[in-house]
Image (spheres, rainbow, N blue to C red):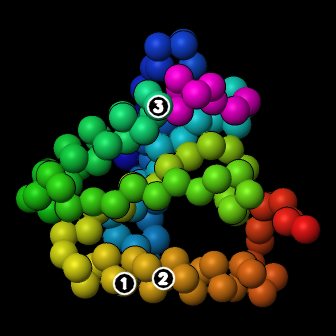
Amino acid sequence: MNESFGLVSGNQCRLMRIKREFIPNYYILAFPVVQGEPSAVEITEMMNLGVCRAKQLAHTLVGDPEAFSILYSGYSSRREKGWHIHIVLLGNRWRKAWLYLVLSGKNLVQALGLRKDDAPRAT
């Protein structure tokens, strides 16, 4: 899956399915880096779009339009460059607990410098 959406500003954003072994039903809604950083209006529009699309996907794939989590990492805590939000379809508490376990492991590995990390270093 790779869907493009036009924003009111004329810029585009893309919803992409990310295939990860440990996190099923994982998507990213991204503002392409070539467009620079999104404006406050574009961020609001993309967050609303992300929630609407997450509800549709959760209803279709999990059977519950409220079975999702949306994660946003600010510039200082992103691993990759470019504005984006993560959409993960869950289904139940165990899947949510698993998601947080996987994310904590990933962030621990990044904090130890064992995995690529483009985030600026806080002093």
User: Which residue, given by chain and number where applicable, does mark 2 sit on?
Assistant: 102
For residue 1, say whether it is visible. yes
Instruction: Please give left or right for residue 26 compared with residue 41 in the image.
Output: left
Q: Which amino acid does label 3 sit on?
A: Thr
Q: Which amino acid does label 2 sit on?
A: Val
Alpha carbon of mark 2 to alpha carbon of mark 1: how far?
6 Å
User: Which residue, given by chain and number where applicable, does mark 1 sit on?
Assistant: 98
Whether 48 is drawn above or below 18: the answer is: above
Callout 1 secondary element: helix
Mark 1 vs mark 3: give the one in front. Answer: 3
Alpha carbon of mark 1 to alpha carbon of mark 3: how far?
29 Å
- In which quarter of the view is residue 69 placed? bottom left
Give how far across and how far down residue 59 sits, in percent.
13, 51
Instruction: Please give left or right for residue 2 compared with residue 68 in the image.
Output: right
User: Which residue, given by chain and number where applicable, does mark 3 sit on?
Assistant: 44
Tag 2 and tag 1, C-beta contact below 8 Å: yes
Range drawn in magenta = 36-43
Callout 3 secondary element: helix
Mark 3 vs mark 2: give the one in front. Answer: 3
**Residue at x 58% of width, y 36% of height:** 31
**Residue at x 32% of width, y 43% of height:** 51
